[in-house]
Image (spheres, rainbow, N blue to C red):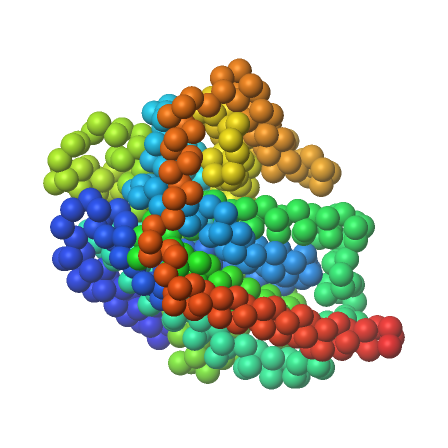
Amino acid sequence: MNVYLTGILFSLAVFFIIGFFAGRKVKDTDDYYVAGRNAPTILVVGSLIASFLSTGAFLGDTGEVYSGFFMGIVIVGVLQASGYIYGAGLFGRYIRRSEASTLPEYFGVRFQSAGLRRTASLILIVSVSAYLLSAIQGVSTLISSVTGLDYSLCTVIVWLAFTAFTIYSGSPGVLLTDTVMFLIFLIGSLIAIPFIVSAAGGWFSGIEALAVQQELPGMISWAGWSGYLYPDGLSNLFWAITYGLVWALVVSVSPWQTSRYLMARDEHVVLRSSIWSSMGVMGVTISLYFMAAFIRLLNAGLEGSQAVIWAATHMLPTLVGIVMLSGIAAAGISSASTFLSLIGFSAVNDFFPAAGQDDRKKLRISRLAMFLAGLVILVLAYLNPPQIFVIMYFGGTVIASSWSVAAFGSIWSRRLSRTGALLSMALGFIGCAGSKIFYSVRGITPPVYLDSFFIGIILSLAGAVLGSALRPPTGEERRQREALFKAPASALDPAECRKDRRMWLVYLGFGVAVGLFFVLLYALPYLRAVGGL
């Protein structure tokens, strides 16, 4: 057993202990599903960021940057972080008012439709299962790489690590462990970056070296390396902007993000946590992507997904490397625990809502559903080779194309009916998932405008319009929508509203700082290196 495995296993043991003690406070399904609706800002922020920044970001995205697609991934990273802001303001605060236990329950009650509730639950289970698979594969790849253990054995270790405390503790355990894990990978990333930059010759020298290197020409230019995705810069830029907006929608409406708002103490927590989360995701991802580019200067012969792992074990002091690798493992485990809990909650609460009426029975069935779902995903991870980036993007685009219209329309459209919402979700899911499977089987890289997301979202919009025209909303559906606009007294508290406005000023300052960073520390050094200044 090497020192890195010891560190990772120690951190997993800590998470298990935290989850165990949190689980002792679970008394009923309200505690188990939504943590008693009393979560403060710090726990909501920790869970939002930790459940989003899985191994897909640490191993998948950084692998794509290392392989030559720097600016495209950076653009996606910046744009996706904006999703927290309009997601909370246009959707999150209203679902908090609904006091639903799950997102499919919200859709079912809002549109007075058990069929829609089950459809939303099915889409949730499929998309979240894909995400859970990528998380297990990511952490298993990490442990296998640093220890030499067989990948299949590592999948079992990882599965046991997050399944035990998630099944026992539910949402309270997930919130606490997510926050601890977020702090670990944040500290690990921030400590590691200066070492990597220094080893590459310093910041400005590194940017200049990346700008003129010939192995992947144009790697850090706005157009990206022409051999990565599309041969022309405009197509690469359009893809990056498109997927940035797609992932902003994922952040806005996906169950692994918006379900955190159901646990918030009040609407002020929803809004403040969205601002902190936007800044946190943007800061962490930008740092990781630049670090992955600098690793290219240190070793150009790696497989992309191994870049950060190699740097942690070869370029960092041992203790820093342990923290970094434990942080990556924590990112994957935290996401896995969130995904598993969502699958179990929705299967019992939404897909089979009559499975148990009393709390004790419902808790038992929820835990059994989690165990069975986790077992299925374990088998898939065991039998299939890791495809972290591909699987992660499948889960994200499917939920964005199938849920976005119904989610925002449930709040802001007077015309969207249960039939429109049902057709919107079903057609968006079929269009996106079906085209992705077709492209994958046939080995096709479609033009940007025929990307699976566009097919899904167009069909979703068509379904919403057609279904609502065939069957307009009922009076009860309208009353359910109107009830969402009745703000509770706590949301109008003047002192709390002033704190909210101060947070917006902080966010504005952060945006200015990010802009100056890219101008002064990226654009100008790059232009000097290529003779543009």
Whether residue 74 is visible to the viewer of this picture, yes or no, is: yes
For the image, the number of numbered tags is 0
Residue drawn at x 27%, y 53% is: 37
Q: Is residue 458 above or below residue 167?
A: above
Foreground of the two, 49 or 148: 49
Residue 157 in percent (x, y) is at 30, 55
Q: Quadrant of residue 384?
A: top left
As drawn, which residue projects farthest toward the top? 470
Q: Quadrant of the N terminus?
A: bottom left
Residue drawn at x 16%, y 46% is: 28
Q: Is residue 303 above or below residue 7?
A: above
Whether residue 49 is visible to the viewer of this picture, yes or no, is: no
Residue drawn at x 81%, y 73% is: 527
Q: Is residue 472 above or below residue 38?
A: above
Q: Quadrant of the C terminus?
A: bottom right
Residue 226 in percent (x, y) is at 77, 54
Is residue 42 found left or right of 447 in the rendered image? left
Q: Quadrant of residue 112?
A: top left
Residue drawn at x 38%, y 33% is: 480
Q: Quadrant of residue 196?
A: bottom right
Residue 372 in percent (x, y) is at 26, 38
Residue 476 in percent (x, y) is at 37, 25
Foreground of the two, 443 or 271: 271
